[in-house]
């Protein structure tokens, strides 16, 4: 791993599941991936992981694109603008995965699994009662062709599992946390294709990164346990492995997971409350990343000052008071006409025509 990035060859991405409005933690992930690309004149991809069709109505895809655009994040390849590595919606990429499933099965690195949800739940319960971490025991690994045929004749629809070696250790470099080591025996064979034929996250996410030429993946630390599985898939298929960096969680000021009780939880919440995108950019860019410049920065300066080595391992705490500071700074960075355009919808004709700039000049120092 450990890619060497030069100008124009870094390629990062943001790959959300459009199942709701863009959470501030995911917005920060998108921002860091975008800043990394823009800091080196690289390429930034937007890819939609929409395999959860029941939770991915069109309204959320539309909202996601709108919110990212409001935020000031643009992309070089994506579902609305195309590119050389499309399609950029995962459901449109399903035929691409079939050859890789077949390659793994031919090599004996994947196998059909007929275990029911009840079977798996019972197995996990037994493991927990014995004080063991739950993992799939591999009962379908060595089924004969006749046994598989009998199960399918009975109408059982199998998942497809990746066969992990029973011994060995996988070393995983991480740009934020340093090198981590995973005992393969602890991982357990995992599903790469669901029984309905749709790809599991582990699989499609890794394959898409490789096929799209992504060499830098920045994502939340909740994905730390996914990474070794994805590296094993890519290695088994002979596909390139990107560099990974896992960002610490974004918490509320009280140390609890960020939610509406902290004042906002989504980018859209802040937009509707009148915050300027530049204020949110300046604040989120500093939550988990150190900038030598302490004052307000435009998006170009934020990109120029961004460095992977300056990402912190400590959890970041979102504080509305701090956001209010950056809102004040963002307002003061605007010229009078821009301030008026921002204020006008909220004043409801309370300022006489022709007096707009005088009002701005008198009031802007106290506007937040």
Image: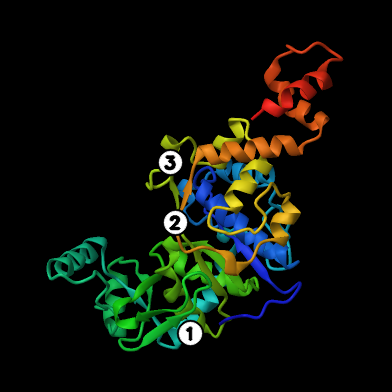
Closer to viewer: mark 3 or mark 2: 2
Q: Is residue 87 visible?
A: no
Q: On the picture, is 25 further left or further right than 9?
A: left
- The residues bearing labels 2 and 1 have C-alpha atoms spaced at a distance of 34 Å
Which image quarter is the C terminus in? Answer: top right
Whether residues under marks 3 and 2 lie with C-beta atoms below 8 angstroms apart, the answer is: no
Mark 1 and mark 3 lie on one chain; the one further toward the N terminus is: 1
Q: On the picture, is 175 further left or further right than 314?
A: right
Q: Secondary structure at mark 2?
A: loop
Q: Residue at x 28, y 85 (%)?
A: 142
Taking the view exactly as shown, the residue that stands out farthest to the right is 354
Q: Secondary structure at mark 1?
A: helix
- The residues bearing labels 3 and 2 have C-alpha atoms spaced at a distance of 15 Å
Q: Is residue 7 above or below residue 355?
A: below
| The quadrant where residue 132 appears | bottom left
Q: Which mark is residue 188?
A: none
Q: Is residue 354 above or below residue 149?
A: above
Q: Which mark is residue 236?
A: 1
> Where residue 327 sits: x, y (%)?
64, 37
Which image quarter is the N terminus in? Answer: bottom right
Q: Is residue 55 above or below residue 125?
A: above
* Label 3 CA crowd tier, 10 Å (few <14, some 14–19, many 20+): some
* Label 2 CA crowd tier, 10 Å (few <14, some 14–19, many 20+): some
Closer to viewer: mark 2 or mark 1: 2
Q: Residue at x 24, y 78 (%)?
A: 139
Q: Which mark is residue 315?
A: 2
Q: Which mark is residue 259?
A: 3
> Where residue 355 sits: x, y (%)?
83, 15
Whether residues under marks 1 and 3 lie with C-beta atoms below 8 angstroms apart, the answer is: no
């Amino acid at each position: 791993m450990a890619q060497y990035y030069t100008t124009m060859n870094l390629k990062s991405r943001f790959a959300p599941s459009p199942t709701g409005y863009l959470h501030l933690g995911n917005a920060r992930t998108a921002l860091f991936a975008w800043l990394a690309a823009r800091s080196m004149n690289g390429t930034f991809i937007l890819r939609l992981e929409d395999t959860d069709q029941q939770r991915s109505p069109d309204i959320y895809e539309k909202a996601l694109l709108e919110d990212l655009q409001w935020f000031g994040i643009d992309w070089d390849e994506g579902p609305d603008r195309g590119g050389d590595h499309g399609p950029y919606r995962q459901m449109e990429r399903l035929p691409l995965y079939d050859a890789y499933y077949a390659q793994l099965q031919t090599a004996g690195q994947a196998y059909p699994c007929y275990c029911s949800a009840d079977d798996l739940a019972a197995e996990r319960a037994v493991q927990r009662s014995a004080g063991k971490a739950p993992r799939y025991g591999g009962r379908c690994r060595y089924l004969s062709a006749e046994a598989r045929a009998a199960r399918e004749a009975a109408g059982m629809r199998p998942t497809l599992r990746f066969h992990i070696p029973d011994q060995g250790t996988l070393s995983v470099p991480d740009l934020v946390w340093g090198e981590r080591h995973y005992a393969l025996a602890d991982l357990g064979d995992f599903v790469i294709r669901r029984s309905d034929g749709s790809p599991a996250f582990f699989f499609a996410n890794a394959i898409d990164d490789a096929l799209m030429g992504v060499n830098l993946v920045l994502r939340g630390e909740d994905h730390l346990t996914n990474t070794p599985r994805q590296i094993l898939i890519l290695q088994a298929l002979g596909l390139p492995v990107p560099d990974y960096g896992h960002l610490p969680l974004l918490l509320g000021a009280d140390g609890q997971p960020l939610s509406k009780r902290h004042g906002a939880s989504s980018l859209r919440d802040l937009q509707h409350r009148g915050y300027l995108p530049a204020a949110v950019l300046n604040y989120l860019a500093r939550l988990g990343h150190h900038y030598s410049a302490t004052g307000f920065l435009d998006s170009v300066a934020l990109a120029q000052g961004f460095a992977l080595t300056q990402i912190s391992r400590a959890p970041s705490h979102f504080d509305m008071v701090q956001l209010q500071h950056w809102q004040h700074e963002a307002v003061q960075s605007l010229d009078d006409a821009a301030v008026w355009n921002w204020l006008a919808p909220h004043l409801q004709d309370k300022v006489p025509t022709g007096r707009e700039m005088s009002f701005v000049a008198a009031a802007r120092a106290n506007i937040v």
